[in-house]
Image: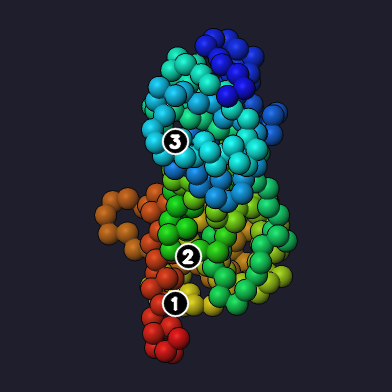
Amino acid sequence: MTEIISSRHNPRVKLAAKLRDRRGRREQRRIIIDGIREIQRALDADVEFIEAFVCDELLEESGHRLQQGLSRAGCDFASVTPSVLEKLVFGDRSDGIIAVAKPPVLQLNDLTVHAEMLVAVLENVEKPGNVGAVIRSADASGVSAVIVADAGTDLYNPNSIRASAGTIFSMPLVACSSDEALSWLRQHAFRIFATRVDGAIDYTSAYYADRIAFILGSEADGLSDLWKGEAVESILLPMRGVGDSLNVSVTAAILFYEALRQRELRSRQSGV
C-alpha cells in the first residue's frame, strides 16, 4: 500500500466520491466500479485501472486475489478505513474494494461486422439500470454488440455496471446518435427490426438468423420516427393484459432468446 487514508475529507477520497455523479464522471473522464465481480470482469476485459481503495477489514480472500491482479495491471492502491470506504461505495456494497478506471471507448467503425451479427440498439433509454439489464441479457444470449443511441444516461453509470453484473465491460458498447446508428446499419446491410406497440409483425413470425438489429426504445416515449422507414420492419410482443408495454430489458431478453432459439435450430437442422 502506498497510502493509508482515515479521513473522509481526504482530497483523493473526495475526488473519487464525485465519480458517483454523472458530472464528476464526465469532468474527470473516469468511472468508479464497486464489487469484486464487477472489478474482476473489467480487469479481464483489459479496462485501464487508475487506483483502488481497499479496506482490509472487509476484504475477503477473493478480494485479495483481485488486488494482486490489479497490482500486476499497474493499479495504485490506498488502504482506507470502513468509514472512508462507506463514503465511496454505491449503495450497500461491502466487498472491501472500490476501483477507479478509464471508461472504455468504442466507435461504430471499431465493431467487427460478420454475416450473422446480432446488434441491439437502445434509443433514448434513460434508466441506467435498464441499460445494464439489457447488456446482461445480451451477453447471456450471444448478442454481438449494444449501441446506445441518443443516450439518456452515461454508459458507465454505477447502476448500469451493477445491473449488468460487470458484463458491460466485455460487451462491445458504442454510444452515438440515432442517425449515425441507422446509417451504419444500412451501410452494412442489417435487417432492422424496430419494436413498437403497433408493430406489423408478431415477434415470433420474423426470421432472425441473418445479420440483424433489434431497435428498442424507452417505455415512456417509444422509438422516434427515424425508425419508421422502408428499411425498418416493425415487430410487436402480444400484450394480453391491461398494460400496453413491457420493461425494455424484458422485451430485449425475449427477443434475444428468440433469435438464439432460431439460430440454434437452424444450426441443428443444417448439421453444423
Distance of label 2 from label 3 (alpha carbons): 29 Å
- Residue 150 placed where, x, y %? 63, 47
Q: Secondary structure at mark 1?
A: helix
Residue designated by label 1: 263
Task: Please state which amino acid type lies under the numbered disc 3.
Answer: Gly
Residue designated by label 2: 142
* In-front residue for pair 201/82: 82
From this viewpoint, is residue 214 visible? no
Task: Please state which amino acid type lies under the numbered disc 1.
Answer: Arg
- Residue 172 placed where, x, y %? 59, 56
Task: Please state which amino acid type lies under the numbered disc 2.
Answer: Gly
* In-front residue for pair 74/88: 74
Asked if disc 2 and disc 1 are in contact, CB closer than 8 Å, the reply is: yes
Write the residue at 65% across / 49% down: 175
Q: How is the image coloured?
A: rainbow
Q: Secondary structure at mark 2?
A: loop
In this picture, residue 140 sits left or right of residue 151: left
Res 84 label: none
Q: Name the mark nearer the viewer: 2 or 3.
A: 3
* In-front residue for pair 6/247: 6
Residue designated by label 3: 63
Write the residue at 34% across / 63% down: 238
Image quarter hosting the N terminus: top right
- Residue 263 placed where, x, y %? 44, 77
The first of marks 2 and 1 along the sequence is 2
Q: Among all residues in the image, which is located at the extreme left?
A: 241
Write the residue at 39% across / 66% down: 257
Distance of label 2 from label 1 (alpha carbons): 11 Å
Distance of label 1 from label 3 (alpha carbons): 39 Å
Q: Among all residues in the image, which is located at the extreme bottom?
A: 270
Is the residue marked by circle 2 packed among few (<14), some (14-19), or many (20+) residues within 10 Å? some
Kindly indicate the quadrant of the structure image that contains residue 152. Answer: top right
